[in-house]
Image (cartoon, rainbow, N blue to C red):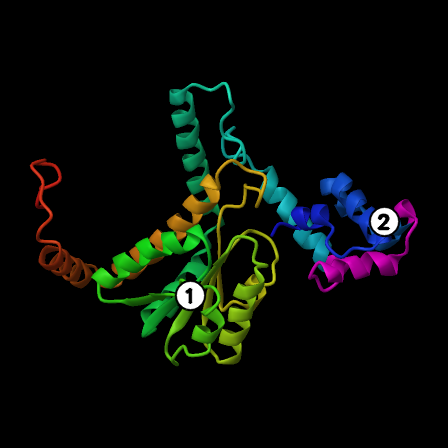
Amino acid sequence: MLIIEKLKLKEKMSDNEESIADFILGLGEELKKYSTRNIADATYTSPATVVRLCKKLGFAGFDDFKNQFLKEIDYLDRQYGKIDANFPFQKDDTMMNVAYKISQLYEDTIRDSISLLQHDSLQKALNLLKYSQSIHIYSFGTTLNLAESFKEKMLKIGKNVIISNNINYQLYEANCIPKGDIAILISYSGETEKIICVAETCKKRGIPIIVISSFGGNTLSKMASCNLTMSTKESMFYNIGDFSTHLAIHFILDVLYSTYFLLNYEKNYEAKLKETTELESRRSSTNPIINNKQ
C-alpha cells in the first residue's frame, strides 16, 4: 500500500498522529526540508510523536519514512500519458472513446511496469523459478484467475505450478510446501493479513518467496526473498474497474514465464508444441492465419 494511502486511512492513529499525517500530506515533496522538530512545532505535538507515527506505519524511524515518502512522491509525479488510472473514462464518453482510453491506459500501465522492473530482482526471481521443483501461488480474488493463465503456460513446458484457490486453507497448504519448492505471493497492498500469514509460514520453513506487490514499503515486501513491483497508479477502492492493477499483474507473470522459457528456448518450444498438438487435437479452424505453421 502506498504511504500516502496509509496516511489518508489513519488506521489506529491518535488525534495527534492524525494531525501529523494531515500535515505531511499537505507538505508533499516539501517534506525534504522538514525535521521531526519542525513537524512537531507546526502540529503542536512532539518529535517523539512524529517518530512513533513513522514506526506505526512500518518504518524504522523518521529518516527511513522521509526517504521512502519522497521516493514515492517522485514515482507518482512521473506522468505516463494523461489517462487517470482510477477513472479512465467519463459518463459522457462515446463507446469508441472508451475503447481508445482503455487502450491508452494499457499502454501507460505497461510502460510504468517496465520502468519498475529491475534487472537484479528479475534475475533472482528467474533463478528461483529455475531451481525449484514446483511453484506455489497464493493470492485471492481475481488475481487467482490471472495466475491460472501463468499456470497453464508453465504446465505446457513441464513446470509444475500449484494455485491455492481456497483462502481459508492457504495457511495449512503453505505449511506443507516441500523443500525445494518456492512460493509466489501476490498482493497489491502488501498488507493482506492472510497472505502475510502465509509469508510468515514460508519464511519460518525456509521456503523462498517471490512477492509481486505495489510500489513503496509494505509488510509483505519486507518478507520476500525477491520483490517484483507492479504499476501503482490505482487506488485500492476508489476506481472503476482495477484495469491497471490486473494488467500489471498479468504482465509480470507473463515476463516470468517468458524469461523462464528463454532458459531453454528450443526444448521449451518443442515441449509446448507436443503438449498442445496432442492434448488439443480437436481444436480446429478454417482461418489460415490461426492454422499457420511456422
Q: Are marks 2 and 1 in contact (CB under 8 Å)?
A: no
Q: CA distance from mark 2 to mark 1?
A: 40 Å
Numbered disc 2: secondary structure:
helix
Q: Earlier in the sequence, mark 2 or mark 1?
A: 2
**On the image, which quarter does residue 84 sit in?**
top right
Residue 72, position as x, y percentages in the image: 63, 47
Q: Which residue is mark 2?
A: 39
Left or right of 132? Residue 291 is left
Main SS type for the magenta part?
helix
**On the image, which quarter does residue 238 sit in?**
top right
Magenta span includes 47: yes
Residue 82, position as x, y percentages in the image: 52, 28
Left or right of 223? Residue 50 is right
Residue 63 in the image: above or below residue 239: below
Q: Residue at x 66, y 50 (%)?
A: 3
Say which amino acid is labelled 1. Answer: Lys
Q: Which residue is mark 1?
A: 124
Q: Nearer the viewer, mark 2 or mark 1?
A: 2
Q: Residues within 10 Å of mark 2 (few under 14, many from 20)?
A: some
Give the extent of the magenta segment: 41-63
Say which amino acid is labelled 2. Answer: Ile
Nearest the viewer among 102 and 281 is 281
Q: Residue at x 51, y 22 (%)?
A: 91
Residue 203, position as x, y percentages in the image: 52, 75
Numbered disc 1: secondary structure:
helix
Left or right of 231? Residue 263 is left
